Amino acid sequence: MIHLIVSIIVGAFVGWVAGQIMGTEKKGFIVNAVLGLLGGFVGGLIGNLLHIGSGWLVGMILSIVGACLVIFVFNKLRK
């Protein structure tokens, strides 16, 4: 249960950072958390494909990059 709570908090943070980078920071906590969690998944896939990843800092950076990609695709599909 604590792992789920931490994942949501980290996902919200990652979503918030990605929203700041992409200029879409006004989406709200829930949307940021979902986009951050999806971004973490996408960032993990990117890290595995490129054989990158070790430690929380690399994971956080990959999650932010993944969340930026998710936001970009989300915005393109919404238009």
Image (cartoon, rainbow, N blue to C red):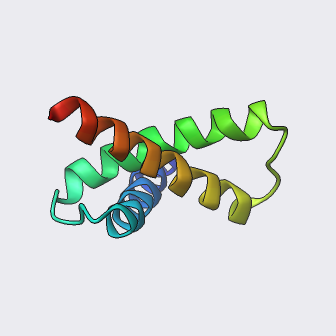
Residue 49 appears in which quarter of the rendering? top right
Say which quadrant the C terminus sits in.
Answer: top left
Q: Is residue 75 left or right of residue 61?
A: left
* Residue 56 vertical placement versus 4 (above, below): below
Q: Is residue 56 left or right of residue 23?
A: right
Say which quadrant the N terminus sits in.
Answer: top left
Q: Position of residue 66 (x, y in %)?
A: 52, 45
Instruction: From the viewer's side, name the closer residue of 68 and 2.
Output: 68
Is residue 1 in sight in this rendering? no
Which residue is pictured at 45% across the width and 48% down the height? Answer: 67
Residue 50 appears in which quarter of the rendering? top right
Q: Position of residue 69 (x, y in %)?
A: 45, 44
Q: Position of residue 31 (x, y in %)?
A: 23, 48
Instruction: From the viewer's side, name the closer residue of 35 and 70.
Output: 70
Which residue is pictured at 29% across the width and 54% down the height? Answer: 32
Q: Is residue 72 left or right of residue 43?
A: left
Is residue 37 in sight in this rendering? yes
Which residue is pictured at 45% across the width and 60% down the height? Answer: 14
Q: Position of residue 23 (x, y in %)?
A: 28, 65
